Image (tube, rainbow, N blue to C red):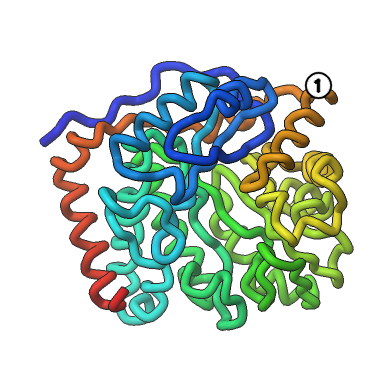
Amino acid sequence: MTNPPREQASTPAAPGVLMLDVMGTQLSAQEELLLASPVVGGVILFARNYESPDQVQRLNAAIRACNPQILIAVDQEGGRVQRLIEGYTKLPAMGVFASRWPHAPQRSEAMATQLGWLMAAEMISAGFDFSFAPVLDIDIGLSKVIGNRAFGGDAAQVAVLANAFMKGMHEAGMATTGKHFPGHGSVSADSHLELPVDGRSMDEIRRVDLAAFVACRDALDAVMPAHVIYPQVDPDCAGFSRYWLQDILRGEMGFDGVIFSDDLVMAGAAAVGDIQARVDAALAAGCDMVLVCNDRPMALAAKAHLEAQGVAPNPRLVRMQHRKMWQREELMRSERWIQARAIAAQLLESRGD
C-alpha cells in the first residue's frame, strides 16, 4: 500500500473574483502579468493547454508561481467533455448509468463513487484544484448540449448517482460543482451559441429539475447557473437573476457554497450588454466568481473594470482549493486507482465509447 495523500497544511489567502484562460501549453510574459492581478483568482485550462502529464504539471506550477492563491480548474466530466485524455483515464459519459441504474442501483452507486474519486485524484495529481463537475441536469432527450452528460432522465436517479460521484470526489480531496442550476435539460438551444428560453412553470421546474439540486445540496461545494431564461418565473437569465441565486438558491435552499457564473463570453450572456455589464450583473446577482474565457480582449476589459472598481478577493472561494495532495506515481501504484480504472474501462466497453 502507498502512503495516504497529504492533507493541506494551511489556508491560503482569498482568491480574486475573475477566472480566465491561457492560450497555450506554457505561459507568455503577458499572461504572467495578467495572472498576478489581485482581481484574478482562477484559471481554467482547455484541451489546447495540454500535451502530457509532465507538461500540464509544469504549466499549473507556473500559474501558481504567478499567483499562489489562484484556483486552477478544468472540465473533466467524462465522455465528450474531457480535456485531459492521453496519459489519464478515459472516462465514460455519466449517461452510461441511465440504463444500468434500474437493474443494479447499488452497483451503479458504487461505480459512480469510484469514477468521482478517480477523476478527482487524477486531476489533483496534475495540479488542478477542481473540475467543474458533476452535471445535475436532467436528460429528457431534448437538449443536445446536455444529452449523455447527465446521469439520467429522472431527478431522483440523478440525485443518487450524483451524490455518489461527489462522495468519491470528496474522498479524493476535491470540491464539487453542480451545474447548470436550476436545470438546462429542457431547452434545445445551446447557450454557447444562443440564449435558450425555457417556458415552463415554476412547479414543473421544481418537479423535473430543481429536485436534483435540492437532493444534492449537502454534497455541493459550488453551483454554476445556466445561461437560460425561465420567463414564467423571472425575466432575467438565471446567472444574472437575484431571484434564482438569492431567493431560491441561497434563501429557499439554504446554500452557502460558491456560485460560479458560466462563461460570460457565451452567446447566452450577450443580451445583458458588454463584458463590463455582464460582470457587474453576475456579481450583483450573487456570483462569487465570474468566468471570461476564450476571448482575451474581453478578459482584459473585465480585469481592468474590476481593478477600477476595487473589487476585493472573495474569502468564500478558498473552499474550492484541493484538500489533499496526490503524487502521480504513488497514485498509479495504489489499489484503488487500479480498481477504479478497471471500472471505467468496463463502463466504456459496455457503451462502445
Q: Is residue 69 above or below residue 75?
A: above
Q: Position of residue 224 (x, y in %)?
A: 63, 51
Q: Is residue 219 visible in this depiction of the protein?
A: no
Q: Position of residue 170 (x, y in %)?
A: 40, 43
Label 1 belongs to which residue? Answer: 310
Residue at image coords 22%, 69%: 346
Rendered image quadrant of residue 105: bottom left
Q: Nearer the viewer, residue 51 or 309?
A: 51
Residue 81 relative to residue 295: left or right: left
Q: Position of residue 21 (x, y in %)?
A: 57, 40
Q: Is residue 37 visible in this depiction of the protein?
A: yes
Image quarter where the N terminus lies is: top left
Identified by mark 1, the residue type is Gly
Residue 183 relative to residue 268: left or right: left
Rendered image quadrant of residue 40: top right
User: For the residue labelled by badge 1, is the local secondary structure a helix, a strand or a loop?
Assistant: loop
Residue at image coords 21%, 48%: 337
Report how many numbered discs are placed on residues in the image.
Answer: 1
Q: Nearer the viewer, residue 148 or 259?
A: 148
Q: Residue furthest front?
A: 29
Image quarter where the C terminus lies is: bottom left
Q: Is residue 216 above or below residue 32?
A: below
